[in-house]
Image (cartoon, grey):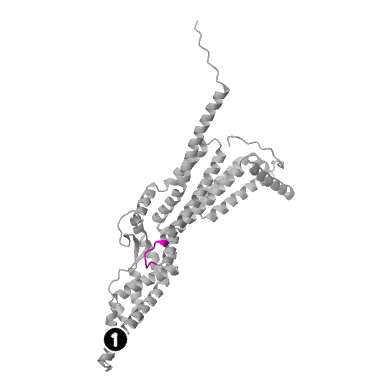
């Protein structure tokens, strides 16, 4: 008969130590995943913005179209067209015509020569003023707005080619400059000048006037970053959400992890907004001489308009999720807020005398499922909303809160909560 050696019992301290080590390992992995999600959150917003701006023609045109009515951009375009047209106009020939006219009036030669010198400056100034006036009329007309939209719609593929490093004819990166061809607008100015009596404008050859959309020494770096983000595309937000979800699932206190994930996302959006403001300041502070600062500011603001709107929406969503996760937890202040709300709703239900019939007991029985359905409907609406703004997210959160309050009102089986509830916190949450 063989006897086996007795297995030594595991001491409670050893079991607790093993559990602590396991929890420490889980917490460390969860923390690393959450930190990675925090880092990726701003990149997600940038990736979605870049993908939507470049792949969606209507979105790109909607972004650039308001610039046609921006006074600073209109002045900058009019000045650029004026310079290009005046350079092609034969102003000395106009002075010679005036000189010949003076010679035909029997003016002494010395006087005619003096008048010619005197006329050179005024004629040039008058022609420049006339061209600038015509340019202003063109760029402030509704026709220019249409031309601007059509040009940006046509150049949409060129923007993609530019950021991806490919060549384009309408929109290119010349060194550090990103330029747009103003040829069609120049043709309208030439027609306007001829209509105003400057027949010499009809002899102006084709003018390849280019308007600088923005100037940056980091164009090629932007191209590299764009190619990287474009390769990730719309998969990056899904990957980031899965990473954050894994971090929350592995955390020992999941509710706190969810609050941390949401707040980290909101902080990331705040940092992205600060980064955009800093980039705008640095960009405007290093503009080349002769570039209109107001026009450059307007173009920068318009290019990042949807990016700013998206980061605000994500930031508000992060704050809303964090607040909801906290208020649904066992914290002292969270329980006080819930108690106050349930007490007020119970008081309204009792005073209203509104008969619910079988609805009240049904809601009480399936209350958890009804609340889950409310949250899922809110998430579905947000997912299907076409480019939500911060205000859209805010009012959607308010609507969800109102729906939750309505469910509590319909729950006739709910007991009026005590004013001093005893917290029963679950350490796992």
Q: Nearer the viewer, residue 365 or 176?
A: 176
Placement of the C terminus among the 4 image quadrants:
top right
Disc 1 marks which residue? 116
Q: Is residue 98 visible?
A: no
Q: At which x and y percent is residue 244?
A: 49, 41
User: Is residue 332 among the parts visible in the rendering?
Assistant: yes
Q: Nearer the viewer, residue 396 or 246?
A: 246
User: As drawn, which residue projects farthest toward the top?
Assistant: 1
Q: Reply yes or no: does residue 287 show up in magenta.
A: yes
Q: Determine whether 99 is above or below 262 in the image.
A: below
Task: List x then y, in percent, for residue 47.
Answer: 42, 50
Height in image: 3 above or below 100? above
Q: What residue span does the magenta drawing correspond to?
A: 284-291
Snapshot quadrant of residue 141: bottom left
Farthest-out residue, bottom = 106
**Residue 109, horizontal then vertical, whole percent:** 25, 91
In the image, taking residue 205 as reference, residue 126 lies left or right, namely right
Local packing at callout 1 (Cα closer than 10 Å; few below 14, some 14-19, many 20+) is some
Q: How many marks?
A: 1
User: What secondary structure do most residues of the magenta stretch adopt?
Assistant: loop
Residue at the far left in the pictured view: 109
Q: Is residue 73 left or right of residue 374?
A: left
**Disc 1, SS:** helix
Splitting the image into 4 quarters, where does residue 67 fall?
bottom left
Q: Nearer the viewer, residue 1 or 298?
A: 298
Residue 153 belongs to the span the image colors magenta? no
Residue under the point 53% across and 36% down: 251
Q: Position of residue 331 (x, y in %)?
A: 63, 41
Residue 99 drawn above or below residue 20: below
């Amino acid at each position: 008969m063989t006897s086996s050696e007795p297995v030594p019992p595991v001491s409670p301290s050893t079991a607790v130590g093993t559990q602590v080590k396991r929890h420490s390992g889980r917490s460390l992995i969860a923390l690393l995943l959450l930190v990675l999600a925090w880092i990726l959150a701003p990149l997600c917003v940038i990736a979605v913005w870049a993908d939507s701006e470049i792949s969606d023609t209507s979105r790109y045109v909607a972004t650039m179209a308001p610039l046609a009515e921006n006074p600073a951009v209109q002045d900058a375009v009019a000045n650029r067209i004026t310079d290009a047209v005046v350079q092609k106009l034969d102003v000395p020939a106009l002075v010679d015509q005036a000189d010949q006219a003076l010679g035909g009036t029997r003016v002494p030669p010395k006087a005619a020569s003096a008048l010619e010198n005197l006329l050179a400056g005024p004629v040039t100034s008058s022609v420049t003023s006339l061209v600038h006036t015509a340019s202003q009329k063109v760029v402030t007309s509704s026709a220019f707005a249409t031309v601007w939209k059509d040009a940006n719609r046509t150049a949409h593929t060129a923007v993609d080619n530019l950021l991806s490093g490919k060549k384009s004819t309408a929109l290119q990166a010349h060194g550090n400059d990103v330029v747009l061809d103003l040829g069609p607008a120049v043709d309208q100015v030439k027609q306007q000048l001829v209509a105003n009596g400057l027949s010499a404008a009809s002899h102006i050859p084709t003018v390849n006037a280019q308007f600088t959309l923005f100037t940056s020494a980091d164009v090629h770096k932007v191209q590299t970053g764009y190619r990287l983000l474009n390769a990730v595309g719309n998969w990056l937000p899904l990957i980031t959400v899965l990473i954050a979800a894994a971090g929350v699932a592995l955390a020992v206190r999941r509710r706190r992890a969810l609050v941390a994930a949401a707040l980290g996302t909101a902080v990331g959006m705040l940092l992205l907004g600060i980064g955009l403001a800093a980039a705008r300041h640095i960009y405007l502070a290093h503009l080349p001489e002769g570039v209109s600062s107001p026009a450059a500011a307007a173009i920068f603001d318009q290019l990042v308009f949807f990016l700013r709107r998206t980061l605000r929406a994500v930031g508000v969503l992060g704050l809303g999720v964090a607040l909801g996760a906290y208020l649904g937890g066992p914290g002292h202040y969270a329980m006080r807020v819930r108690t106050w709300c349930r007490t007020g709703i119970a008081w309204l239900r009792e005073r209203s005398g509104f008969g619910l019939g079988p609805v009240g007991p049904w809601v009480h029985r399936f209350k958890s499922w009804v609340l889950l359905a409310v949250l899922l409907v809110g998430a579905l609406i947000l997912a299907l909303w076409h480019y939500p703004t911060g205000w859209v997210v805010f009012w959607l959160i308010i609507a969800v809160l109102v729906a939750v309050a309505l469910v509590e009102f319909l729950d006739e089986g709910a007991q009026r909560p005590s004013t001093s509830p005893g917290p029963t916190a679950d350490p796992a949450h």
